[in-house]
Amino acid sequence: MEIQTNYPLKSLNTFGIAANAKEFVSVNSVEELAEVLKENTGKKLFILGGGSNMLLTQDIDALVIHVNLKGIDVVWQDDETAHVKAMAGENWHEFVQHCTGLNYGGIENLSLIPGNVGTTPIQNIGAYGTEIKDTMISCEAMQITTQQIRTFTNAECEFGYRESIFKGLLKGQYIITSVTFGLTKVNHKINTSYGDIAAELTKKGIVTPTIKDAGEAVTAIRQSKLPDPKELGNSGSFFKNPIITIEQFEKLYILHPTMPHYTLDDTYVKVPAGWLIEQSGFKGSRYGDAGVHARQALVLVNYGNATGQELLDLSKKIQDTVFEKFGIAIEAEVNVV
Ligand code: EPU
């Protein structure tokens, strides 16, 4: 393991921002990770997974540790369920495809989400009515100060909407090394009710979809709406969908009767940020190389040479305009570095 200096990160973040790491090392095993942490105690660290949920606005003045742990194993199974453990550095979509190819069900609606396995519990990734918390049994993580591995059960992760203990109380303290999912082998609970999944399957003439069919339908829908980071730099949803009180929603609904919304409970309603941004006139807009995607206003894009600061400025302009128009504060989902 060699620590490199002034290391370029452009190909390691899906926004494709040109920024350097003061120091950089890639670790290929749990032992190597422990060794690097032990030898560099006291140093400022930055943990890099798939680089799909961050906006680099400056060079990283730290030792960047690229978690490149690989491996997928069925660690337990019976006739109905398989517990599949994936190491943190596995590409998420390739892992989903591996599981759907084996007809293991539960994560097919999370197809084509960019990033690596190790970052999925941090923000409890979700799409099409499914979240990581629905199938995750446990994850293993190394404590940075002691290099001890701790197993976190699903409950211990304290999952919420794009939230977990790793973003909250334990932020910056642990590095996730593996995640284990409990997937169905039979009696699958395929959820095609959300969005266009059912329509996509009908279009293909599929009446009783397999797990693989459902995964492919989600992949096709995402490909039609969301930009491929390999072609157009982006970080998926830049903002979280805001949660407002029913009281505030009812006042807004009188003024904007087409506002889409999901009632969460007796007190709160979730409103799609993409709709608020589109209504504020930003969909498809472009300022230099920083822009708002033309087919999904929740996604900011880098047309080539945008700087992180330019994208951050655009995000602030969007937040201000949405707030002026609707009185709703939308929060970034990506980590601004
Ligand atoms: N909408 C608009 N204009 C837009 C985008 C959306 O009016 O430009 C409206 C849609 O018409 C729809 C509603 O907003 O009525 C919701 O849109 P959609 O179903 O596309 O989902 P979303 O709320 O915009 C969330 C996730 C996505 C996930 C989709 C599908 C968040 C922050 N985002 O987006 O996650 O793929 O649902 O389940 O919760 C990601 O996190 O990177 C991501 C892409």
Image: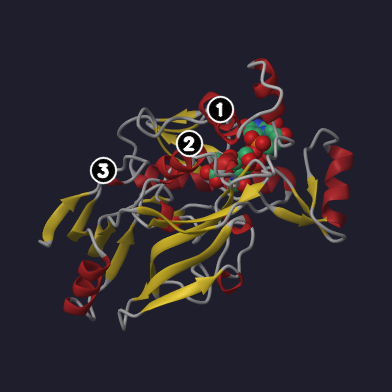
How far across and down, in percent of the image, does residue 194 sit?
A: 71, 37
Q: Is residue 331 left or right of residue 250?
A: left
Q: How dense is the environment of label 3, judged by Cα within 10 Å: few (below 14), some, or many (20 and up)? A: some
Coloration of the structure image = secondary structure
Name the kind of residue labelled 1 in the image: Lys
Please tell me which of labels 1 and 2 falls first in the chain.
Answer: 2
The mark lying in front, picked from 3 and 2, is 2
Q: Residue at x 35, y 32 (%)?
A: 230
Quarter holding the C terminus is bottom left
Give the amino acid type for the residue marked by disc 3 in the picture.
Answer: Lys
Residue at (31, 43) in percent of width and height: 17
Q: If the image is split into quadrants, where does the N terminus sit? A: bottom left
Q: What residue is shown with label 3?
A: 10
Residue marked by disc 2: 101
Question: Is 40 placed above or below 93 here?
Answer: below
SS class of the residue under badge 1? helix
Judge depth for marks 1 and 2 and give the one in front.
Answer: 2
* Mark 1 → mark 2, Cα distance in angstroms: 24 Å
One can see residue 196 in this view: no
Residue 215, horizontal then vertical, whole percent: 56, 34
Q: Quadrant of residue 325?
A: top right
Q: Is residue 252 visible?
A: yes
Residue highlighted by disc 1: 225
Judged from the image, the secondary structure of the residue bearing numbered disc 3 is helix
Sequence-wise, the earlier of marks 3 and 2 is 3
- Disc 1 under 8 Å from ligand 1? The reply is yes
- Of mark 3 and mark 1, the one earlier in the sequence is 3
* 45 horizontally vs 224: left or right: left
Left or right of 11: which side holds 97?
right
Label 2: element kind? helix
Q: Count the numbered circles shown.
A: 3
Q: Amino acid at mark 2?
A: Gly
